[in-house]
Image (spheres, helix red, strand yellow):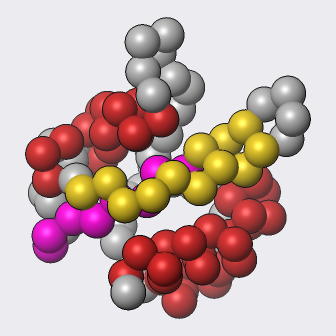
Amino acid sequence: ALPGGALDSHEDSATAAAREAHEEAGIEPHHLSIKTIFSDDHGNWKYDTVIAHTSGDAGAYLSNAESEDLHWVLIGDVQTYELHPGLAASWPTLQQAVSDTLN
């Protein structure tokens, strides 16, 4: 899975993603450049994936016990991992969204 979690009552998706990146991966929000938001909408609920870029590794590290492992991978290698079922289902579309931000 990716670092993430629920929105606080005062947050939008980008603000929550920056907070979660800091809480779970130690990435300071000022290292993030938000590019787009991919919404996996299921009618009565939706899951937003905020696509952001950093320079280098942005100092990422396991910063709390919510994660068992953390490392950067090449975008073409993501599908070779055992992904959370929701991420696996949306990965082909999400991968294209990420690729679109690189051009």
Q: Is residue 54 left or right of residue 76?
A: left
Range of magenta residues:
49-56
Q: Position of residue 34 (x, y in %)?
A: 32, 54
Identified at 53% across, 86% down, the residue is 77
Give the number of callouts: 0
**Is 94 rendered above or below residue 20?**
below
**Is 96 rendered above or below residue 36?**
below
Identified at 53% across, 89% down, the residue is 76
Give whichever of 46, 19 is nearer the camera.
46
Q: Position of residue 88 (x, y in %)?
A: 73, 66
52 in the magenta segment: yes
Identified at 24% across, 57% down, the residue is 33
Q: Magenta span: helix, strand or loop, mainly? A: strand
Can you say which quadrant of the picture contains the N terminus?
bottom right
Give whichever of 2, 12 is nearer the camera.
12
Give whichever of 13, 26 is nearer the camera.
13
2 in the magenta segment: no
Q: Is residue 28 left or right of residue 51?
A: left
